[in-house]
Image (cartoon, rainbow, N blue to C red):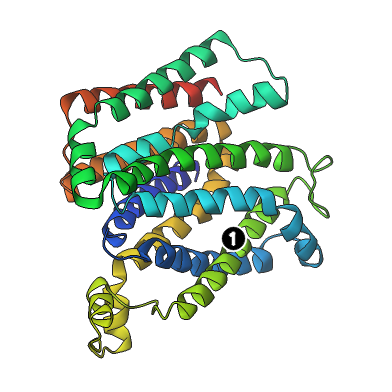
Amino acid sequence: MLWFFLLFSTGCWGLAEIFYKKGNVAHERYAHLKTTVFVGIFFGIYSLVIALTQDVQIKYLPANFIRYLPVAACYIVSMVCSYYGVRYIEESISDPIENTSCAVVPVLCAVFLHEELSFKTVIAIIIVVAGILGVGFFDFAGKADRARVFGKKLALIALAMPFCYMILDAIGTFLDIYYTTDAETSVLIGVTESNLEHTANCCYEFTFLLVAIAILIFLKMKKVRLFSTEEDEARISAGEQPEKKNIFQKIYGQRNKIVAALFETGGQATYLFALSEGSGIAAVILGAGTVITSFILSRIFLKEKLSVLQYVFIGIIFVGIIALSLIG
């Protein structure tokens, strides 16, 4: 079952990245927040399934939600940054940068936990950093196009989003290590080795649901409908009434965001089982497999084209990520 879980999670997350890009269009102002809502809804449903079917101590969940909040906040904010960024930049650029968070985690462990970095780890981190710098430095055409279409300020903010994801995801992963390495020393209460990861996952996904509810309230205050499309919002801005649609038409209008959320949840549902059955090989495939899958799919389905040098440096990033996964 290990390989099934690995391939399923990798495939789901790779496909999710493609639909995130398709669903988060540049001129739909709140597209990234709508995506967050859909992910939060599906995560909330799955967290309920976990709580009812796994050995999770439900009576301790309210306290654990609060205790796990710093970790969940890092993960959730990082994902919102990612959704915002892909509105403006290529998936082929954003995803490799985002997934280099695995290079930041060892550095955080060395600084705050005084863990020693092996020579191989340092070399792998240098390779990843070199790849990131190369991709950004040689993004001449992309920078010029984004600055011309969206303005220099927004173009700079958009390019910063994958780096924000990288840093926040690394901090979340670092904190996760502290929370879930050992049940006896974990900050979470009422946990055992058998239910520790499921309890943490449940807390994270339920927190995501609460964020989704908060965003729905925000959108309501802004008079933005969850199922309104870019065309609907343009009509409303022009003082016109949007076209009346039935529930199926509304869902179809947001199909890319919904499908992305489904694939994200599908990957989330199986990755814990993959890690528990084979942490070493799982880290390699989940760490680099998702990046490679989304990179290939974005080339095929999104028709994204980069410069030759950018492809070279993205390849360098892949090598660094795989090396870190193998070393770790």
Residue 178 percent location from the top left of the image: 72, 38
Q: Quadrant of the C terminus?
A: top right
In the rendered view, would you say 259 is above or below 287?
Answer: below
Residue 70 visible at all: yes
- The residue labelled by disc 1 is 205
Residue 127 percent location from the top left of the image: 41, 17
Residue drawn 52% across the image and 37% down it: 167
Q: Nearer the viewer, residue 284 or 168?
A: 168
| Number of numbered tags placed on the structure image | 1
Residue 207 image-quadrant placement: bottom right
Residue furthest toward the top? 119
Residue drawn 40% across the image and 58% down it: 263
Residue 222 percent location from the top left of the image: 44, 77
Residue 12 visible at all: no
Q: Judge left or right: residue 54 versus residue 89.
A: right
Residue 182 image-quadrant placement: top right
Residue drawn 45% across the image and 21% down it: 323
Q: Nearer the viewer, residue 241 or 269?
A: 241
Residue drawn 59% across the image and 12% down it: 118
